[in-house]
Image (cartoon, rainbow, N blue to C red):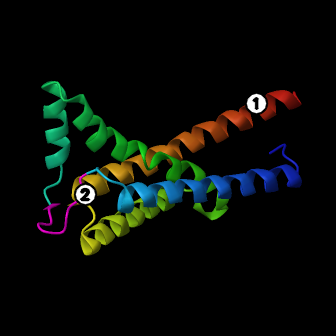
Amino acid sequence: MAFTKQQKDIIRKGSWLLFFMYMAVMIYFLFFSEGFHRTDGSLYQYNLNLFQEIKRGFWCLEHGNVQYFIINVVLNVVAFIPFGFILPIISPKNRKLLNIFLLSLEMTLAIEILQMVFQVGIFDVDDIFMNTLGGTLGYILYEICYWSLRKQVKRGRE
């Protein structure tokens, strides 16, 4: 690329800062915030049927409950887009789709297991699917931006 070593260091350090801020916000919303299907510990819930909550989300959308759809479908995908976008910037060895897919899967599986163990959410296989999809989409967005940047730099040299 046409970036100097100093510019690359600034981008990487800024990306690390964004990544830590992103992870702090995720930890807060996933484990400590009120709402978002928190359980009171008396009756723990879980979903092991793939696409059950996604289908429910689309059913709710069709019947006018847009908020349920946004919280349970859209936000589960969107929440992991930064993970897939920032990780290849801060970790050059993670500039492969398979790596980001697996890391997104591992991260969301760890989150769901922690929520189950500490009973601070609902273990949901649909969340695993949607979060992994979000991380993968984040990586695809990273690749599109990286490709576009390379193309602009190449045009600037001509």
> How many numbered discs?
2
Up-down relation of residue 104 to residue 63 (above or below): below
Up-down relation of residue 154 to residue 18 (above or below): above
**Foreground: 144 or 40?**
40
Q: Is residue 77 visible?
A: yes
Magenta span main SS? loop
Residue 133, position in %: x, y?
37, 48
**Foreground: 9 or 118?**
118
Tell me if mark 1 has few (under 14), some (14-19) or many (20+) residues whose alpha carbon lies within 10 angstroms of its own.
few
Tell me if mark 2 has few (under 14), some (14-19) or many (20+) residues whose alpha carbon lies within 10 angstroms of its own.
some
Could you tell which of marks 2 and 1 lies nearer the N-terminus? Answer: 2
**Foreground: 45 or 57?**
45
| Residue 116 part of the magenta segment | no
**Foreground: 44 or 108?**
44
- Between the residue at mark 2 and the residue at mark 1, the CA separation in whole angstroms equals 46 Å
- Tell me the magenta residue range: 37-47
Question: Quick one: quadrant of the C terminus?
Answer: top right
Q: Residue at x 84, y 46 (%)?
A: 3
Which residue is label 1 attached to? 152
At label 2, which amino acid type do we have? Arg
Which residue is label 2 attached to? 38
Residue 140, position in %: x, y?
51, 43
Q: Quadrant of residue 77?
A: top left
Q: Is residue 95 visible?
A: no
Q: Are marks 2 and 1 in contact (CB under 8 Å)?
A: no
